[in-house]
């Protein structure tokens, strides 16, 4: 809860007039405890877990865009999507939400603040970049560990139930995996603590990104076109396509870890085969057009 009774007190304390954003924050948080603000993480995590995947389900069932689907021969039925949705919702209600409710002391301990002044946009972006890098690196090694035979067969196999992932499969996992993979998301804020706004935005963006890479679609607006080393859906989809035997594409966000540690070789080979296959198809189409043109010319000459 902010230690100011009025806007004037807040402005006097920080030595300047409040910005529009700070005024909105003051009015919204003045009578709310820090714990209540932290609990905003629950709906902010629930929204990308439920609403964002629904967009991809609608694309799959109502507005199929086959040219952007990574595994076009596999169609996830409405029943399978609903079954996955139930598993994700159950995990959220029984594991994720209760864990968030009891983890507030750790947030206070690492120094996440709710006070004024608000961080600048530059500070927010810089901290988010750090959070993404730290989470990506630590999750890379955790993910590799979860592909050890015993761990995979007893825990991680649940997440790989769908070899052609859909949006809901991003959170489709064993309850223990859900808890363990939640740890890297807190390491960045623990190392570089910031404002509660930055922390909540980080949780929302990370979960939305997770849905995107599990979507099964390489859409035109994918962030890999704008963010260096970003893997995107196509990069992670290959990991699910190979399944339990996969020793490639472990990083959840960027591609540099897989490049540095040589765990992207299978994916590179797969891409080369796809490119060769596409070139062969294009060559056959070109030959067919040329042959068709020759026949047409001969026919017109004969008619004349």
Image (cartoon, rainbow, N blue to C red):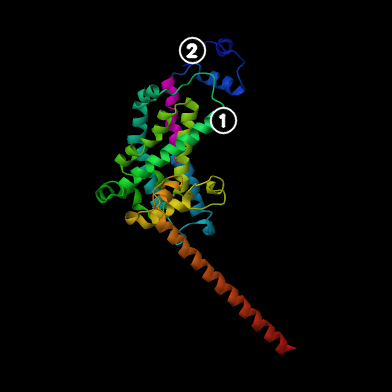
Circle on res. 122: 1
Pick whichever of labels 2 and 1 is earlier in the sequence. 2
Residue beneath label 2, please? 3
The percent coordinates of residue 48 (x first, y second) are: 46, 39
The percent coordinates of residue 20 (x first, y second) are: 61, 22
Depth order, front residue of 257/194: 257
Q: Secondary structure at mark 2?
A: loop
Mark 1 and mark 2 in contact (Cβ < 8 Å)? no
82 part of magenta stretch: no
Depth order, front residue of 6/77: 6
- Whether residue 18 is situated above or below residue 213 in the rendered picture: above
- Whether residue 151 is situated above or below residue 243 in the rendered picture: above
Tell me the residue at 44%/26% (across/down): 193
In which image quadrant can residue 16 be found? top right
> Is residue 232 rendered to the left or right of residue 246?
right
Q: Is residue 29 visible?
A: yes
Depth order, front residue of 57/124: 124
Magenta part of the chain: 34-48
Circle on res. 208: none
The percent coordinates of residue 3 (x first, y second) are: 49, 12
Q: Nearer the viewer's eye, disc 2 or disc 1?
A: 1
The percent coordinates of residue 285 (x first, y second) are: 57, 73
| CA neighbours of label 2 inside 10 A, class few (<14), some (14 to 19), many (20+) | few
């Amino acid at each position: 809860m902010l230690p100011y009774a009025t806007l004037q007190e807040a402005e006097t304390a920080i030595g300047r007039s409040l910005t529009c954003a700070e005024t909105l924050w003051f009015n919204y948080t003045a009578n709310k405890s820090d714990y209540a603000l932290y609990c905003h993480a629950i709906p902010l995590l629930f929204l990308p877990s439920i609403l964002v995947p629904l967009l991809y389900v609608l694309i799959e069932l109502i507005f199929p865009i086959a040219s952007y689907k990574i595994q076009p021969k596999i169609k996830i039925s409405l029943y399978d999507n609903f079954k996955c949705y139930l598993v994700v919702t159950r995990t959220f209600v029984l594991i994720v939400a209760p864990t968030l409710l009891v983890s507030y002391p750790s947030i206070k301990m690492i120094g996440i603040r709710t006070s004024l002044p608000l961080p600048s946009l530059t500070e927010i972006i810089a901290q988010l970049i750090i959070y993404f890098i730290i989470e990506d690196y630590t999750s890379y090694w955790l993910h590799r560990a979860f592909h050890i035979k015993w761990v995979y067969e007893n825990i991680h196999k649940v997440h790989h139930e769908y070899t052609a992932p859909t949006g809901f499969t991003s959170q489709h996992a064993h309850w223990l995996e859900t808890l363990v993979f939640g740890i890297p998301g807190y390491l960045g804020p623990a190392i570089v603590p910031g404002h509660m706004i930055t922390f909540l935005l980080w949780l929302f963006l990370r979960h939305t990104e997770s849905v995107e890479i599990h979507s099964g679609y390489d859409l035109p607006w994918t962030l890999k076109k704008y963010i260096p080393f970003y893997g995107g859906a196509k990069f992670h989809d290959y990991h699910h396509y190979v399944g339990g035997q996969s020793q490639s594409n472990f990083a959840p966000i960027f591609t540099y870890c897989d490049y540095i540690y040589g765990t992207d070789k299978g994916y590179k080979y797969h891409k080369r085969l796809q490119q060769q296959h596409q070139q062969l198809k294009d060559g056959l189409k070109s030959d067919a057009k040329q042959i068709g043109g020759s026949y047409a010319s001969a026919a017109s000459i004969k008619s004349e």
